[in-house]
Image (cartoon, helix red, strand yellow):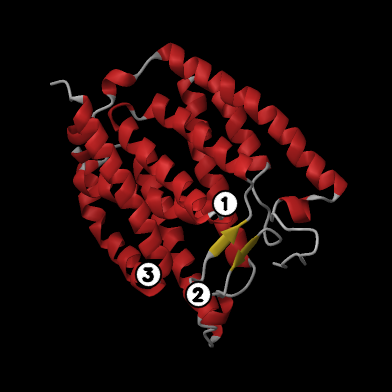
Amino acid sequence: MEIPVWQYVLSMGGYTALLILIVHFMRKHYKISNWIWIGALFTFPLWLRNIEGWFRVFKTLSILLPIILFGLARTSNYEDRKGKGWEFLQKGWVMWTLYGVLLLNIMEATIKDYQLGNMMNVVCGVVLCITAPFPTKYWKIYKGKSSDVIAYTTIGWNFLYTTWNGCFVYGETGAYFAASLCIIFAAEIYPLVKRRPELYIMARVYTLATHLLIRACFGDLFPSLMDASSWHNAEVLKYWGIINAIVCVPYAFWYTWQLHTGKAERTFKRLKNNEIPLQG
């Protein structure tokens, strides 16, 4: 049965708004967030009934396990916890691990793009990996009010990730594309509203984890509300990938130039001339 336009507007708009609220809640209430994600692991039996294939199961685990580490590190740093275990979570290896998880998730999708023949989007995925913010210089856990995990991505990188990921899910997810757009838009909108592009990775982590958990636990919920199967068009996928590949080339040159000229310390962190760069 064809879904009316008003249902897409309501379901997609409502889901995007819900995800933005979840990001804000998780960011502000780090302790409750920890318990939610630890408890999420116990839903594993439901996954076996609702998702199929290595990619989906591995994708769900590859985001839930790191998000628990993500939460514990926030707690340890914000509260300056003492003890070997807590102090271990305050060291640089945590930022390197989160960086590795980011690259892993990009490469998972890039490999899938390669298998699907979406070669131009593969180029964009590789550029995103190369130009991702480098730990520990451009990653830190802020010990302020919300214990934010900061990754100094640029506005351009955030946009490239959004359009690259949109193209990937368009070619790979079929009926789930509309729901996937919601998590992409929510992660993009939240940092823009806050005027803090460095919150993009944090927003992306929470929106993706929420979406994958709902999908693993409730199976066909999204296709029943916002089935996007009829949206697929091979020509759109082809040209979307080509545009992404073209756009990422000047960005890669700009990124390299910032590093080469020594401007990266200020441009990536968006500092004014009289501001002192933050370390770590």
Q: Check the image and report above or below for 114 versus 33.
A: above
Tag 3: amino acid = Asn
Q: Check the image and report above or below for 147 versus 204.
A: below
Tag 2: amino acid = Lys
Q: Which residue shows up at 58% across the image and 61% down it? A: 150
Farthest residue, direction right = 261
- The image quadrant that residue 32 belongs to is bottom left
Question: Which image quadrant: the N terminus?
Answer: top left
Q: Check the image and report above or below for 245 versus 258.
A: above
Q: Which residue shows up at 38% across the image and 43% down it? A: 183
Pick the residue in front: 202 or 121. Answer: 202
Tag 1: amino acid = Pro
Kindly identify which numbered label has been placed on residue 197: 1
Upstream in sequence: badge 2 or badge 1 = 2
Of badges 2 and 3, the one in the foreground is: 2
Dots 1, 3 in contact, CB < 8 A: no
- The image quadrant that residue 232 belongs to is top left
Farthest residue, direction left = 1
Q: CA distance from mark 2 to mark 3?
A: 17 Å
Question: Which image quadrant: the C terminus?
Answer: bottom right
**Label 3 sits on residue:** 34
Q: CA distance from mark 1 to mark 3?
A: 24 Å
Instruction: Residue 205: give x, y in percent of width and height.
Output: 45, 53
**Label 2 sits on residue:** 145
Q: CA distance from mark 2 to mark 1?
A: 18 Å
Upstream in sequence: badge 1 or badge 3 = 3
Q: Which residue shows up at 18% across the image and 25% down it? A: 3
Of badges 1 and 3, the one in the foreground is: 1
